[in-house]
Image (spheres, helix red, strand yellow):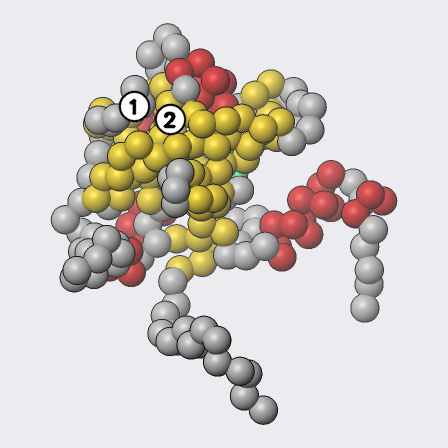
Amino acid sequence: MPIFATSELGARERYQLLTSLVVPRPIAWVSSRSAAGEPNLAPFSYFAALSATPFLVGVSIGHRRGVPKDTLRNVRETGAFCVNLAVEARLAALNETSGEYPPEVDEFARAGLSLAEAHAVAAPYVADSPAVLECRLFKEVELGPGDNALVIGEVLAVRLSDAVPLIPGTLFADTRAVRPVARLWGDLYALLGETPALPRPASGTPAAG
Ligand SMILES: Cc1cc2nc3c(=O)[nH]c(=O)nc-3n(C[C@H](O)[C@H](O)[C@H](O)COP(=O)(O)O)c2cc1C
């Protein structure tokens, strides 16, 4: 069995190991706007739920040829962004928005998507998105000079469409109804498979056996 010392690997090899082992990763489809008013939309799978109180999500955004990607630049300029739920029905459009386009390209138009304006922050979102997290920049953590920045967003408002039912009596959104998409590696994606339910073990009970 090989053991890889990560410090002896190149950036590409580290990327390959990381993205193929941490799977499946949820995808934040991030919409934002530049200070000049240009809308922007791109997917990011270095994405995680961080905390419910405060309500925080994290997206790690890279640089392109030494320059921050448009999303990162926009979040720095405006302190606002939206995370649109990535779903199977819009996978082709999501992929289209990952192209390395110049800043003036509007990925909404490019992918044939309509935009709408968020309520709590100054950012657009994908119209008819099943679920949207409206985020204000909470903190940015540099993960390496000129490499990646962890953008932590505080979710000020959650927007749900009628396509996402709530589990009765709760605010669990049954996203199974809209078939969320996750990323594996390279050009591979994963769809939700079986969703087994397992009751949690009772606390304080001695382990059996
Ligand atoms: C499914 C998917 C996930 C991605 N995840 C990330 C990511 O986590 N971080 C990143 O920097 N780029 C990621 N990318 C690449 C960006 O989407 C791509 O660089 C995009 O052009 C950035 O757009 P922007 O310059 O408009 O911000 C991903 C691409 C795809 C297709």
Q: Position of residue 166 (x, y in %)?
A: 19, 56
- Residue placed under numbered mark 2 in the picture: 136
Residue at 83% in and 51% down: 5
Locate residue 81: give its quadrant: top left
Residue 188 in view: no
Q: Quadrant of the N terminus?
A: bottom right
Query: Is disc 1 placed on a helix, strand or loop?
Result: loop
On whether ligand 1 comes within 8 Å of the CB at mark 2, the answer is: no
Establish if 42 lies above or below 89.
above
Q: Position of residue 80 (x, y in %)?
A: 37, 23
Cα–Cα gap, marks 2 and 1: 7 Å
Q: Quadrant of the C terminus?
A: bottom right
At label 1, counting other C-alpha atoms closer than 10 Å, the crowd grade (few under 14, some 14-19, many 20 or more) is many
Residue that sits furthest to the bottom in the current view? 209
Q: Position of residue 181 (x, y in %)?
A: 39, 53
Establish if 181 lies above or below 31.
below
Q: Nearer the viewer, residue 57 or 52?
A: 52
- Residue placed under numbered mark 1 in the picture: 121
Residue that sits furthest to the front in the current view? 204
